[in-house]
């Protein structure tokens, strides 16, 4: 799905970003869209364009012969009891043990786009596991709005334990090389940073896409190589990057940070075409694969 220059009012896109982060409710989101639309029909069309289109965004089909996929459930005794996720690996039996990469979703649960990200990593000869933080409530419901509502009902501390359990499980698998990485998006980017703090030398690399930085006092605990991606128009996170960069430098953590001019929050998500920025997404993904190949092989 190739992005063209957005025809939607920037105010509508900004309202969508506030909505998906839970900063405003659906009624407020729709009200803001209506204010910049010329008619009720136009408002409905704007909302439709802002919603994810998973089928059109799929890059690697689940039936791709190069990979094998399955769902697996991981025990999480300190979290919600267990967490279910999507496991994707290369199909070739001759690959030997593989580096593992935990894939952490946005604040909607394990949707088809994140499963596609796991398959993209499998095609690149990694073993990827994408857990679903909504497991304790039945899993991602197939609806973005319901997913957000459910997400707010899961205890955050237990959710963090679930992701940690998934990371430990992936690293310890018999077909794992023992090298572990994590990539996360938005909420998942924050989780990637948090896992880097918690896991220390047990995590080799972390790639947070537009995720919140950890507290400065925790940065010295990080031993993983950190690669940060932000959209240039994602003001709050961009403004926070210099402090994180300085803290990583002071702590001697191997890291890089990339800010993509003109890209907004969520620029890598090609399921949301009005946020997707192909040039930024392609560059960020290429550097992500290079980062994992360098620090996980």
Image (spheres, helix red, strand yellow):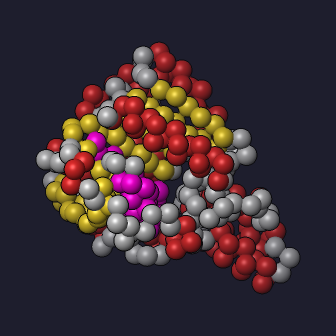
Tell me if I can see residue 235 in this picture: no
Q: Please say whether residue 100 is one of the residues in the magenta stretch.
A: yes
Left of 254 or right of it: where is 8?
A: right
Quarter of the image where the C terminus is located: top left
The image shows residue 32 at horizontal and vertical percentages of 74, 67
Residue 141 can be seen, yes or no: yes
Kindly indicate the quadrant of the structure image that contains residue 66.
bottom left
Relative image position of residue 79 (x, y in whole percent): 23, 54
Q: Is residue 187 left or right of residue 257?
A: left
Residue 196: image x %, image y %? 35, 35
Camera-side residue of 154 and 256: 256
**Closest to the observer, 184 or 18:** 184
Part of the protein shown in magenta = 99-123
Residue displayed at 66% across by 48% down: 279
Q: Return the residue found at the far bottom.
A: 41
Please name whichever residue, 267 or 38, is drawn nearer the observer in this view of the structure.
Answer: 267
Q: How many marks?
A: 0
Horizontal side of 73 relative to 2 (left or right) equals left
Residue 125 in the image: above or below residue 215: below
Q: In the picture provided, is 98 more to the left or to the right than 233?
A: left
Q: Nearer the viewer, residue 204 or 19?
A: 204
The x, y position of residue 211, in whole percent, is: 50, 44
Q: Up-down: is 294 above or below 120?
A: above
Name the quadrant containing residue 269: bottom right
Residue 165 is a magenta residue: no
Residue at (36% x, 31% y) in the render: 295
Q: Residue furthest right?
A: 38
Quadrant where the N terminus is found in the figure: bottom right
Residue at 66% across / 61% down in the picture?
2
């Amino acid at each position: 799905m190739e992005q063209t220059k957005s025809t939607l009012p920037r105010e509508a896109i900004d309202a969508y970003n506030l909505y998906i982060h839970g900063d405003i409710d659906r009624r407020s989101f729709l009200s803001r869209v209506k204010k910049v639309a010329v008619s009720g029909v136009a408002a409905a069309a704007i909302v439709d364009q802002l919603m994810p289109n998973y089928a059109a965004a799929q890059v690697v089909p689940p039936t791709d012969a190069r990979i094998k996929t399955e769902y697996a459930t991981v025990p999480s005794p300190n979290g919600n009891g267990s967490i279910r996720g999507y496991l994707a690996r290369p199909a070739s039996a001759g690959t030997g043990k593989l580096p593992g990469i935990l894939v952490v979703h946005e604040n909607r649960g394990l949707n088809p786009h994140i499963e596609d990200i796991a398959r993209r990593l499998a095609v690149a000869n990694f073993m990827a596991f994408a857990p679903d933080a909504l497991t304790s409530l039945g899993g991602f419901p197939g609806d973005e709005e319901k997913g957000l509502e459910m997400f707010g009902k899961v205890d955050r501390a237990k959710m963090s334990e679930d992701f940690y359990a998934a990371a430990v499980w992936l690293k310890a698998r018999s077909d794992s090389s023992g090298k572990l990485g994590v990539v996360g998006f938005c909420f998942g980017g924050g989780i990637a940073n948090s896992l880097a703090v918690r896991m220390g030398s047990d995590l080799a690399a972390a790639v947070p896409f537009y995720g919140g930085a950890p507290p400065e006092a925790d940065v010295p605990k990080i031993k993983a190589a950190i690669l940060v991606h932000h959209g240039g128009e994602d003001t709050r996170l961009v403004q926070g990057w210099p402090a994180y960069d300085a803290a990583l430098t002071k702590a001697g953590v191997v890291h890089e940070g990339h800010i993509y001019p003109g890209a907004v929050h969520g620029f890598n998500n090609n399921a949301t075409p009005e946020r997707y920025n192909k040039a930024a997404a392609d560059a960020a993904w290429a550097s992500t694969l290079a980062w994992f190949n360098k620090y996980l092989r």
